[in-house]
Every structure is written in C-alpha cells, then in structure tokens.
Amino acid sequence: MVEITPRFAQHLDLPRGKGDLAAPEFHLALNDARGPDGQGARHGTAGIGLGATGLMYANFSGFAAPGLGAPGGGAGGAGGASAFGASKPVLSKGSKGADVQTAEDQINGWRAENGRKPIKADGKYDQQTENAVRDFQKENKMDVDGSIGANTHDRLQLENDASFKTIDPATKTLIRDQLNANAKNQVGRESMLQVAIDPNLAKLPPDAQQSYVKKLAANPANLQQIRDDVKDRATLEKDPNFGKLDAVTQKNVREKMEKYDGRPVERDLLVKLATDPNFEKLGGAANRDRALKALGSNPASAAHLASLQNMIGSNSFQNKIDGPLKGQIFDLAAGHAGDSRYVQDLSKLVSDPRFGGLGLDEQRKTIDVFKNTTVAGRTALQGLLQRDVNGVSALKTHGIAKNAPTLLDTLHRLTTSPTMDARLRDGAGQPVTPAQYSEQLLQEVSAPDNFVDQSNRGTCTCTSISHKLAARNPAEYARIATDLALTGQSKLANGAAINVPGPTAWAADNSTRSHSERLIQSSLMDYARPGKTYVNNQGGGGTSLDGWADRRDGGLTSDEESRVMGGLFNKPFESFDGYGIFGSKTDIMNKIRGELGRGVSHVNVDLEWGSGGHAVEVTGIRNGRVFFRNPHGTAGVGVTGTIQGTAGNNSNAGPLRRTEDGAAAIQSMSLDDFKKAVQNTYVND
C-alpha cells in the first residue's frame, strides 16, 4: 500500500461539469492515472505501478456490490459482466471481440426502446457501430466521440437495466442529468449508477425515488446508507399490510421514513409498527396517526414499540374500546413516551380483558384514575382491576347506603380533585396531593390484607373493623377515606357523622400508616366515644402514643367497638362472651364457628394480650388451629414461619402464635391457646 501514498497528496484539477459532485482525492488520483473517457482506460491501475489498487477500491463503501465489479481493469482486477465502465476496455472503430458484441447488443436494446432500427451485432466495431454510438451519445447529451469509454459503458448498462426501465420517467431524467454532470467524476457517476439500477429503487413511489437520487447527488459518500434506506423503504412498500393502509397514513409513514434516513434503529421500529397487521385495524387514519406520534416520541426504544404493539394487538383494545378513547390512550403514550414504565403500565391496563369488560364511561374513569395517580398507584390499580367482591368487579361495587357511589366513582372523584383539605400534611409539613393519597388508598382497597394496619398506635379495634370493611365493601371504605381527605368529615352507613379529630390526626406521625389509615382510624376512635376527643399523638403520659384525656392508655371497650361496627355496617352488633351470667369460652368458640359457617369471612374477636387486650379477625378454624388476621400488619407479624409471643401469654408480646402468611398478616394459634386467650366475639344482632 505504501507505493500509492504519494498519489493521495496530489491536487488534481480535472474538468467537471456544472453539476459535478465532489470526489475524494483517492478517486481523483485514479482518474488521473486512467485518463478521461476513451484515453488509456484499458491500461488498468496496476499497469502504471498502482499495484493492488483494484482490491483496495473494492473496500470502499458502495463498491464491489453484488453484480458490480470493482474498478481497475487489466492487471488491477477486471470486474465481471456487470462491472463499472472503468473496468472495461475502451472500444472504438476497429475493435473486435466479445466486448464489442456485448456493446452492440446494448446499443440495439436502447435503439429498440427508442424507435430505431437495430444495427448488425457481429462483434466488429465498424462505421455502423460508431454511428450508432454517436447517436446514443448525442441523444443522451453526452460528449460525442463515437468511442465507448468508461462513461459510455456505464450509460449503456444503465439504459439496458431492467429495473431502471421501470422507474418513474422524471426520476430517469434526473438520474441521466446527474450522470452527465459527473461524466468525468468516477465516484459520483458510479455511485449514482448503483442506486439507479438497484431493484429496490424501482419499488418506491416517484417522489421517494427522486428524493433518494437527490440525496445521493448531494453526498455520494453516503451511498451505502442511502442504499440501506432505499432497501428498508422498499420493504415497507411491498408489505401487504402496509398496502392495506389508507393513503393518508401511507403518506404519513413515508414522510417519517425519510425523516429517519440514516437512523436504522428508528427506521426499523417504524417499519415494524407500520407493517403490523393490527396497525391497520385501529379504525381510521386519525388513530393511526396518533399511534405513529406515540412511537415518534421515543422512536429508538424497542420496549416502547413492544408496549404499543401489545396494546393494539389485544382484543380489549381492538374491540372493546371506542375510537375517541383509543385516541386519548395514544396521546397519553405519546406524552409519556420517555417513561417506559408508564407506557408499559398503560398498555397492560388497556389490554386487560377485565378493562375491556368495563362500560365505556367506566373505562374513561379508570384511565383518569390511572393518569392522575402515582407509579405505585398504577400498580395497585392493576391489582384492583383483578379483584372481585361477591362475584362482581370491585370497581363496580357500591357502598352500603342507598345510592352510594361505586368504588370507581369515588376513586375518580379523588384523583380528579384539584386539591385535598389543606390541613392534611405529609411528614415534611407539605400539603398531601390527590395523587399521593390515591396511591395509598388504591393499595388498601386492592389488597387490604397487605396494607391496612395499626402500626404503633393503639387502634387495633378500629383497624380490624376498618380492615373488615375494606375486605367486604371496598367502595364504602374508599368513600369514607375520600370524604375525610377532601372535607374533613363523612357520614357512616347508619347516617352518623364522623370528623377528623383535631390537628394531630391531620399531620403525619411517626407511624407507618398511610394518610387514609390515619384519618379513618382516628375518626372512628373519636366516634366510638361521643364527647371525648381522640388524640392521635398525645405526647407524655400513658403507655400508648394515642388516646384520650380521660383514658391515656387508649383502646376501646366492647360496647364502644359495637358502636363503631354498627355505624360502619348499618347493622346492630353486640359483644358475645358466652351464655348466662358466667358464660363460657366454649360458648364463644362455638359462636365463632357459627359465624364462619354462615359465611362471615372475618369474625371480630377480642383476645387477652399479656396484661391488656388485642382485637383480631378470625378467618378460619382447621386442623386444631385458629387462623386470624392480626392488625399489627405485615411489619408486625414478621415473615411467614415467624414464632411470636409466649406460652403463658404473660407479656406484651402476647400469646404464642405462628405467622402463616407474612404478607397478609395472617397468624395462627393452637385451638387450646386461642380458647384460653379469647374474651369475646361480635355478632350481628
């Protein structure tokens, strides 16, 4: 390679036409060595001391493509039958042989296309052949000299190419003009020839053909990129699914394809969307345009495309959602395209058959909840969508009172509210937003076992009761929690009013409870004792962080618990501690079994817990053990398999028990130990 280095440094002034393309010095050096068309091209580059230049040339972008040999005739390496003109011998009057025969056949092919009689093709370059060559050169606005050099070889190849014959006439004219302008510029001419005879170019619409020709003319060094762009565009044009699209959408896609020229990743993802059979099923150009905009907002993300394709391919999205809502969903995807988690969650939601099973108004409200909550809230909404209550989608269930709103109606009211009650503050003293509050409420109504707990407050009674409400009637739980957060007050199912009791309930405390848990538990504790103001954070005195001025250790009596249950469920409840004056714990256990037997899923029970008491919900009795939900929550019961308490139940750790499901806060005790600890249960009178 060293022998050719000096040639790169030469500054050669070769004649160029008005439209000539800039040629790299390497190609100028080759032109200088070979001479102009018809002068010494037969020598080949190796014949003048440039050795293996033909091989080196083949490594340049765009050359030695299939069917096209690398330039450099003679010892430099002749090309094949479809080689560039620069690799072929110069033919003139007196030349003979197969090369002449081939040229004469090409001339006759051109003459047949242009209404001229054929010449005798006998492999002899005579006067008739020269005259025909001059005619060809004149008609094609070339330099007329009657000989066939590199430029004329290339032009004969072009005019006889099957693909070139099928392209748009205006594109043909543009290509011919560019070849003429680059008659003395080998790289520009040969680059243009490669694109002109590329079968993929002929598959494009006329405007696209001309656009790519002009792009190549402006920068021939981009030959390979342009051929790749043309290939991808041809793949798009011949795809049967793309062919089914309306003209407006096709035009839109084509424009975006050109925008992504030179950007293979973006171009590939666009083609995948535009040729997806479900893309055509979107029901109109407007929604297809929105889908394209959604992809265009993050055009290089395969994950983003996958979310869009999963969405448009689902039966729910295709057949259960109307056009306007589809458009809104695409707009959301476009507006959050940079957030792959958001688009993935959106796709999962609207692709879910249970979302498709909602009514149109319910679907719109669900989308509003989705877009106005947090990341964790969106996850909880997905879970809530799967939840049924008594065989009905939880979102469609109503509260207890007549004409009570559905759970979805309440969540929609919350998430579309501009602000919360100004007194509701987070741990930093800042106002709690509807999005923040909805996140926690969505978690509690989607999976109450996992999220409703008392934390470090003495609210086991109201926590167990409110958990039971969230499990049995999440719509009622959400209504009360939303009322309290927006206005500071609510009405229970029995018509009684409850209020958030004072500033300590409004402000975040050192518990791990959510804002909604704190408001509900505080308000119910306050309701349990009329005329006694509950204090959520009472400061010094007593063994509990919360309580009343007259009861520093917190907690509720059985009558007070019954009052709360009656208000929440609008049914009279009484505490049962056995029959007769003395009663018996056997009576209590039988009553619990009876409640479970008649379908009560959570039976409220009070237990002796060391020196105090603790309210739990019994969920089952089997295999000699009693299973219950502990309001201490997931953090309080430990992981599954944890052993807590003491056999003698003689400390604040409570009775001996085993955690059966840490995530749901389900524990169990032996039947004997539970019978010893049980104090009373609550039954609907």
Image (cartoon, rainbow, N blue to C red):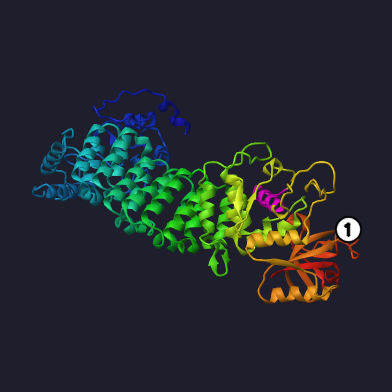
Q: Nearer the viewer, residue 637 or 155?
A: 637
- Residue 595 picture location, percent across and down: 70, 73
Q: Residue 240: horizontal and vertical position, in percent?
A: 32, 59
Horizontal relation, residue 53 to residue 520: left or right: left
| Residue 114, percent from left and from top | 11, 47
Mark 1 surroundings within 10 Å by alpha-carbon count, few (fewer than 14), some (14 through 19), many (20 or more): few
Q: Disc 1 marks which residue?
A: 611
How would you classify the magenta stretch by its main secondary structure? helix
Q: Image check: 342 left or right of 545?
A: left
- Looking at the rendered structure, the kind of residue marked 1 is Ser
Residue 417 located left or right of residue 449: left
Q: Is residue 32 magenta?
A: no
State the image quarter where residue 450 is shown.
Answer: bottom right
Is 473 or 500 nearer to us in this picture?
Answer: 500
Where residue 62 sits: x, y (%)?
37, 42
Nearer to the camera, 306 or 39 = 306
- The quarter holding residue 461 reads bottom right
Residue plotted at (39% across, 40% down): 54
Label 1: element kind: loop
- Residue 630 visible to the viewer: no
Per the rendered image, the range of residues in magenta is 512-526
Residue 518 in magenta? yes
In depth, the one of 530 and 65 nearer the eye is 530
In the picture, the quarter occupied by the C terminus is: bottom right
| Number of on-image labels | 1
Locate residue 170: give its quadrant.
Answer: top left
Vertical order, 113 against 644 (above or below): above
